[in-house]
Amino acid sequence: MRTKGLLIVVSGPSGAGKGTICKELLNRRDDINISVSATTREPRNGEKHGVNYFFLGRDEFESGIEKDAFLEHATVYNNLYGTPKDYVMEKVNAGEDVLLEIDIQGALQVKERYPEGVFIFILPPSYEELRKRIIGRGSETEESLKTRFSSAYDEIKLVNHYDYFIINDEVDKATDLMVSIIVAERNRVMGNVEEIMRTFKKEEKGC
Amino acid sequence: MRTKGLLIVVSGPSGAGKGTICKELLNRRDDINISVSATTREPRNGEKHGVNYFFLGRDEFESGIEKDAFLEHATVYNNLYGTPKDYVMEKVNAGEDVLLEIDIQGALQVKERYPEGVFIFILPPSYEELRKRIIGRGSETEESLKTRFSSAYDEIKLVNHYDYFIINDEVDKATDLMVSIIVAERNRVMGNVEEIMRTFKKEEKGC
């Protein structure tokens, strides 16, 4: 019935668990595509172009930015990362759903370019829990822990730019909820009226 | 987390099966209230005021209309029927979800008064199936069958005033979808930002 797929944008403060939920979602459903990012960093062992990333030269990436070829992009440790607009929109226009797991700043950039996306904000159950999770990773320095904690409030405030929130108390429940949101969004009237009216053409009126 | 409940308005062409889906939904979930209508018709055997209907005198009902006390109202066979606004809104404002199963004209009246509602349109899988279902009821005269069939197209066109559509192919699947829509709508950011920010107050920022 659907003509267009969904662009599902998932983000939230770091430590909220968006990565775990997205992984679980992709495990459960093979009808959802994960977006492949572009980057200027070197491929690591075993990484494949077009699978893990689109590996681009810096010139190529920068000319892409000028041509508005990215739904969002950012610089991380001197490397450029971005979401290729054509790659994502080709799938969406073909009726496929694409999942984009990105940070909040990236999500807001996507929203400017494609407000019809479904914007989902993952929240931790509490600051206490967020703290435990970030410390639990063990990969943070004392300094970066402080930065993360102190930015949590400012990040959570940005929830008002999103369509849905999910409190990630248990991964299974949070994933159930994500599935419900996707299933519901697939049944939105907006964007599907023409298709519905094609199914119920006037010719058949007399039935 | 939620401050306000949902007003879930379900309608669609007659024969699409909205009644069956709503019954199945209420069987499954005890966290959804069905709205009680007001009417000027006489109570039948065993019907209770405030349970089956609010039985009102004609004067009372008409003065209610003047005071805009109904979310929608209509005249059927010389009797007035309507949805009492206070009854519904008290529940919604207390955080409870209320289900309203009404015809399309009624739903459009509700939308004018409460556009924040969740408007769901039930569709048959095809005109052919719609026809079978209406004939299957056996309760229609030849004349009323013709009227129903010929109004189906005009009714289905009104889907564009709704938020969601559900194709009622199998009752169980259609009810699953209705549950997904309700669960998703409960997690909309709009209307819940204050509550979210209360959970994540700035005081805890340092955590």
Image (spheres, coloured by chain):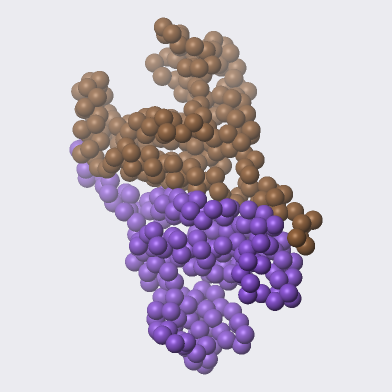
Chain colours: A purple, B brown
On screen, residue A49 versus residue A70, left or right, reads left
Depth order, front residue of B157/A74:
A74
Above/below status of A11 relative to A74:
above
Taking the spot 55% from the left edge, 38% from the top edge, the residue there is B6
Q: Position of residue B84 (x, y in %)?
A: 56, 24
Query: In front here: A52 or A189?
Result: A52
Asked where in the image residue A136 lies, by quadrant, the reply is bottom right
**Is B65 in front, or is A36?**
A36
Q: Is residue B161 above or below residue A142?
A: above
Q: Residue at x 70, y 76 (%)?
A: A141
Is any atom of residue A117 visible in this view?
Answer: no
Quarter of the image with the C terminus of chain B is: bottom right
> In the image, what residue occupies the spot 39% across and 44% down?
B177
Q: Residue B15, position in %: x, y?
A: 30, 32
> Is B205 positioned to the left or the right of B161 in the image?
right
**Residue B11 x %, y %:** 41, 35
**Is residue B98 at all visible to an observer of this figure?**
yes
Measuring from the top left, give residue B154's x and y in whole percent.
33, 39
Q: Is residue A172 left or right of residue A196?
A: right
